[in-house]
Image (spheres, rainbow, N blue to C red):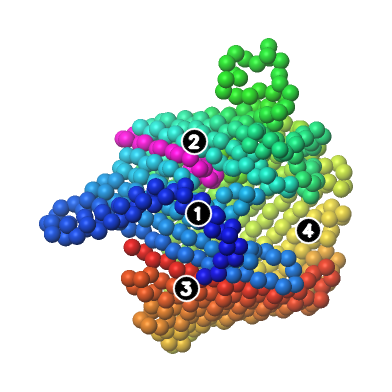
Amino acid sequence: MFLPNRKLYMVQLKKYFRNYIPLFITIFVLLSSSVVISQTETEQPKKQVQRLKLTGDFGLYNEQYSISGREKRRPSSTQRLFFNPSLALFGSLKLDFRFVLSSEGNSAKQDINQFDINPRWSWGKINAGDFSLTYSPLTVSGIKIRGGAIDLFPGKFRFAVFGGTSQREVITFDKQQSFKREIYGGRIGVGKNNKSHFHLTVLKAEDIFNSIEEIVIDTTGMADSSFADSNAIPAITPKENLVAAINTRLDLYQGKFVFNAEVSGSAYSRDLTASELNPDEVPSGVDNVFTLNTSSAFDYAYITDFKLNLKKIKIITKYSYIGPGYVSLGVASLQNDVKSFGVGFTYRFKRTMIRVNTNFQTDNLIGQKLYTTDRNRYSLNLNFRASRKWNISNSINFSSMKNDASSDNLSLDYTALVLRTGHRISLSKGKFRSLSFDYTFQKSKDANQLRSSSQLDSHSGSIGLQLNLSRSISLSPSVKILMNKQGGNGRRTTATYSLAGRHYAAKKKLITSLRLSLSSQDESDNLRGSLKSKYSFEQLGSLGIEFSYNKFDTDIINSTSFDESFVKIRYSKSF
């Protein structure tokens, strides 16, 4: 196995095992004990509950990458090691472990290596190490935490707490620099997440300013992010966030009527180094839980939805309001200063399904921006089976985006229409298994003449065939033609020819797949190919290897030709 930068990689490996060597010793003891216990239990009556059961998987991954003609898009070499054992004790307690060690991490990025212990039982669970939590859309969702969490749910009662680090300090001179961020919180309430419930959630997140004290922080002259130059390097500032929310769900008549609602408030200081407020202006005791200064903002958000789930009809309505000052550092991505309303309708009858969705969104909720932008979307999907062998899928999508800016440079009046029809015919006789056809029409434009170059007219069609040449060989050739005209340019045509194949051998222990595609345009060609093979050794696990190649040739100005290749090797074993 290739190991470039061997010294650096060995330093990372030694550091990782030094930190977790006690845990590896514990796992080794447990694995050894499981063998003795399993041998003893074979002599016990079959009705007796197995005291300890070990399952899981482990594996290795190696990737070699090269490119010529342009800058690298991947590291030249990547290695990963994973180990995921799971122990079941006395049929009531389960301990899941997860280890991931990767050569991709460095001090200029958030840590990629992962370690997690997750004990679970009938009325609770614990996380220790690296994990993700989902409490609600406005509080905690989608972020990685390195620390600990406990979630208890005996009966209808629910109690949960967590704490740790959501990002480590990164000292660079680009947009990836960040402070170390500590986050903790919890929730209490009654009811399960997917049933009727009432939960109260509290969250606190704070950046540690001294974690990158070498960086000079300059917050003067910072513009609103809506108008900032996207190419400029923004000054980073230490932040603090406090969030409190109420989340409730009402589930009636076995899920036929469901109502969800969440109301949340946030306090957010975007710069802990900003000027302090006059002590007389700060309520007594507030400074003990939150840092108030001239950069602090307070706002609220709420989300509601109602669902009607009947046998043939489903209706859902959603409304959300996210205030311009609302921030939760426990959510991976959350757009503020918007409100939206949406309605969805689904009808199923025998071989037919109709789905209609609408959504209306607007921003600039308190008029602090130069203009207000409205975004609307409408969609209609009609799927039905014309016969036992013929499936048809049709859709219409229309979207618009418009603002009330007085300046022509900022004015926006954009519309887009997409029409699609897809057909699949099953051919049960002989080598021909199925035939598919797809056609898509797209038209978009902006009424602002200064943006006429964004106008697009596009037609694309594809046809594919699936063949089973034998019980062990299948092929899927396809052809796609794309014709588009953008702005004042002439119409351009791109033709893509593809072939996919699969072969089974050695009683399906060896699976080999091939994929080739060639895209040809007026002044450029793109050839892609991949060959994958995987062999299962039964008790010894499985080994896979993949070769990928990408060649791009062009005569277009300001575009470069390049050759790109991958070699990937994977080994995994379940136990």
SS under mark 1: helix
Residue 261 percent across, percent down from the top left: 51, 35
Which residue type carries mark 2?
Answer: Gly
Q: Residue 544 carries which label?
A: 3
Q: Secondary structure beneath disc 3? A: strand
Marks 3 and 1 sit apart, C-alpha to C-alpha, by 27 Å
Q: Residues within 10 Å of mark 3 (few under 14, many from 20)?
A: some
Looking at this view, is 573 or 531 the one in front?
573
* Residue with the mark numbered 1: 14
Figure quadrant of the C terminus: bottom left
Tell me where residue 462 appears, x and y as whole percent.
62, 76
Q: Residue 365 appears in which quarter of the rendering?
A: top right
Span shown in magenta: 132-156
Residue 448 can be seen, yes or no? yes
Of mark 2 and mark 3, the one earlier in the sequence is 2
Q: Nearer the viewer, mark 4 or mark 3?
A: 3
In the rendered structure, which disc, 3 or 1, sits on the residue that comes first in sequence? 1
Q: Find the distance from the CA under tag 2 to the CA under tag 4.
A: 49 Å
Side (left or right) of 372 relative to 140: right
- The amino acid type found where label 3 is placed reads Gly
Residues at marks 2 and 3, CA–CA distance in whole angstroms: 39 Å
Q: Quadrant of residue 477?
A: bottom right
Establish if 433 lies above or below 417.
below
Residue topped by disc 4:
445
Q: Is mark 4 on a helix, strand or loop?
A: strand
Q: Earlier in the sequence, mark 1 or mark 2?
A: 1
Residue occupying image coordinates x 57% and y 46% = 343
Question: Considering only order in the chain, which callout, 4 or 1, is on the residue closer to the N terminus?
Answer: 1
